[in-house]
Image (cartoon, rainbow, N blue to C red):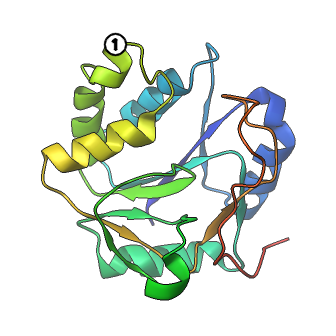
Amino acid sequence: MTRKILMCMKERQSFVDYLTQKIPDLELCYDQVRSARDTFERALSLAGNDQVVIMEDDIILTKDFQKKLELEISKRPWEVINFFSQRPTDLIKGSRHDSRFSFNQCFYLPKGMAKGMLEFSSNWWGYTTGEHPTGYDMMMDDYLRENKKQHWIVVPSLVNHRSAKSMIDPRRSTKRQSKTFNEEWE
């Protein structure tokens, strides 16, 4: 089984409870200093050299999530896999390689990548300039491009983004859901 790490906040304990009920082996990485970057980097550090799925706490799972997740990982354990997308082309193209990484709701990193990404993160321009202090999906995109790595988008999405206020930026829309997510696991 692939390790699974949840980046979470105490203010969202009901979301965390839902996820730990569905995924008993979920490892929790609570926010400690109200920083998405810090929590993400601690999740990467926690992963070490292992293959890992990293999730945010504001997701809803599809039915039989773990079975579907492991099946998708078994098809391409050497690639970054994103289990959430809200791109218009999802309905037309389905699962595919994509050149731009975005959305960190739930994604897989192959063995050794979390460590490399953590090292890259410490000097990433978006953090060092202060231009994108919470943009770790942009940091991941730059990491993948610099290392000439593709990523795979799974369609339909295995998770959906909750219709809830963002803890990073409450001005963000609550309408950031996947058009392909189905079979909510209640």
How crowded pointer 1 is (Cα within 10 Å; few <14, some 14-19, many 20+) is rated as: few
Residue at the image position 32 percent from the left and 13 percent from the top:
128
Total label count?
Answer: 1
Q: Determine whether 12 is above or below 35 in the image.
A: below
Residue 118 pos. (x, y %): 30, 31
Judge left or right: residue 52 versus residue 165.
left
Q: Amino acid at mark 1?
A: Thr
* Residue drawn 38% across the image and 39% down it: 138
Residue 144 horizontal side relative to residue 156, left or right: left
Q: Nearer the viewer, residue 70 or 153?
A: 153
Q: Is residue 98 visible?
A: yes
Q: Which residue carries the number 1 mark? A: 129
- Specify the quadrant that holds the N terminus: bottom left
Q: Which residue is rendered at x = 61% and y = 51% of the image?
A: 26
The quadrant of the rendering that contains the C terminus is: bottom right
Q: Which of 168/32 is in front? A: 168
Residue that appears at 64% across and 17% down: 34
Indicate the quadrant where residue 159 lies: bottom right
Residue 49 visible somewhere in the drawing? no
The residue sitting at the front extreme is 88
Frontmost residue, 111 versus 142: 142
Q: Looking at this view, is 170 or 82 the one in front? A: 170
Q: Along the horizontal axis of the image, is 88 left or right of 19?
A: left
**Residue 62, x across and y down, in percent:** 69, 74
Residue 104 position within the rendered picture, expressed as x and y whole percent measured from the top left: 51, 49
**Callout 1: helix, strand or loop?**
loop
x and y percentages locating residue 96 in the rendered image:
36, 78
